[in-house]
Image: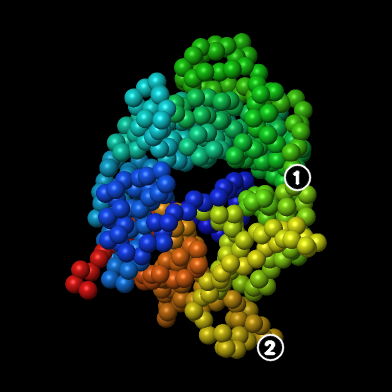
Amino acid sequence: MNSGIGLKPPTSLQITSGRLSSRADDVKNVCVLVARKTLGSFPKGAYNIHRINMNILRKIVCQKTTKFRKVWTKHSKSAINYVNGRIYFANFGCCYSSISSKPQQLYEMPRCLKSEKIEDAILCEGSLGEALPQPSDYTSSLLAITGHNWLLRIAADTGETLQKVYLGSYRKFRYITWDVPQETLVVKSIQKSGVSEDQQSTVLFYFAIFNVFPLKLVGVMEIDKKIFGSNVADAMISNGMLIVMHSAGLVRLYSFERIAEQNMQQMCVLGETCTWKGEAGTVGDFPFGVPCNITLTERPPILFEVPCLENAFQVGGYPWHYIITPNKKTQKGIYHICSLDDHILAKNGIRDLKYCALEPDWIHFHPDASERIIHVGPDRISVLRLKELENDSYQYGVIEEFNILAMRDRTVNKKVTVTAYGRLVKRRYDQLDDDPEQETFEAVVYEDELDLLTVVAVTQTDSEGRAHVNLHCNETGRVLKKTILQESWDVTHSHALVFDRDTLIHIEERPNHNFSCYVYKMHCNLED
């Protein structure tokens, strides 16, 4: 399974916890690891069978005789999505499994009207260790929101609809995400546009919150400008927090649990009869839907607020720190790492790579829960760590653990002549740091089961870009494997790369709604 590191800092909380280590990771010999599998797990030996299996696979993936070969290509006129071993086409209506040597079709749903197509979806894995009411509740499923406001639970391997919930007609719902992964999901409506004369003209969004295992309604709440302020620009719910972003460059955090407890007007249960504002109906059935039963009359207590540019705010590390760009346009590209407790800047906590590039650098807390930070520029990937300091005026500092550098000739004179509108200008500028003729980092992905950093680097060759994928040790940054992609990589197109165990998947979006999916599989050359 992979964890992507995006191009821009997410406006969400990222909660991290310490990683577990195993002495199995220190074993160099694959034969020893295979032998240990037969012994099972013991209380004093951290030889978890799954971890040993993944350690064996990592060593096989990274050995010299192993190659990644392109085994499958498929094109589409609609978006392509990958989720945990499944590739989705036709608005999630067609599903292929990528686990076998070549992707195999699992199912294809009957064609439907455009208004009934799936808008967004997330994968919900089966529950472990819990007694659930229905056998189908244990089934891994796709939780999807359709264009006509139905929340569907679809069997992940067959496409069968297991459950349907009608959300209502008061607002179009379009986005679905996790509040707490595999526990609580949030369905978000589109933003209200224009001004109407009805009493809800100041309501920007609605959130419908559900628990899973089994699917159970928590409630529906609205984001009203009268409550949260007239300059509210966006909002989301993540890790139990309501995060409200303001157009003035201010992010505020509230406790969603407290909001729900104190402002729940009426408990609503899916499938049960409910009377709401004089109208009776079954909750989750058409046309009654799900009432907006969490209504605020005043702004809840603010847990935390911070000004930041473009509402880019994220939390992580230990102890808790946050990363922002100060709320000034002149500060764009500069990141501050501060303590969540007292807003104090960490020592060496200002990150400014001083790049001259078309695409901005980006920074994130590492998704491996190691409390580290990854800062990615066109030619440098820095892995940073927060460290408690002793006998220093700063309590915490940021140190570099390692750097990954692009293959460039550092001695080349970067002065180039620049033209504008076809005319030669006299002034000379430095060459852009993400110039296509130089090797440039385009994507960084973390494969959590193999504990590898996957880095995509692109170089313009003649008329097209050529990309290669490097696998790096997550602890040291040392390159362990290099794979050249056969297809070209146009940096002006949108791309997504997935590395999942023995599979590399490259998804490309070209102009005019043209999408392509390229699948590479691991092959071992036994002759070598």
Identify the residue under disc 1.
305
Give the vertical position of 151 relative to 405 (above or below). Answer: above
Give me the residue at 44% from left, 71% from top. 479
Amino acid under disc 2: Lys
Is residue 375 visible in the rendered image? The answer is: no
Residues at marks 2 and 1, CA–CA distance in whole angstroms? 47 Å
> Dot 2 surroundings within 10 Å: few (below 14), some, or many (20 or more)?
few
Tell me if 336 is positioned left or right of 215 in this view: right
User: Sequence order check: which comes first, mark 2 or mark 1?
Assistant: 1
Q: Position of residue 372 (x, y in %)?
A: 59, 58
Give the vertical position of 277 relative to 228 (above or below). Answer: above
Q: Position of residue 234 (x, y in %)?
A: 66, 43
The numbered dot on residue 426 is 2
Describe the element under mark 1 as helix, strand or loop: strand
Residue 430, by quadrant, is bottom right
Give me the residue at 42% from left, 37% from top. 124
Amino acid under disc 1: Glu
Residue 435, by quadrant, is bottom right
Give me the residue at 65% from left, 66% from top. 399
Describe the element under mark 2 as helix, strand or loop: strand
> Dot 1 surroundings within 10 Å: few (below 14), some, or many (20 or more)?
some
The single residue placed furthest to the left in the displayed view is 527
Tell me if 11 is positioned left or right of 252 in this view: left
The numbered dot on residue 377 is none
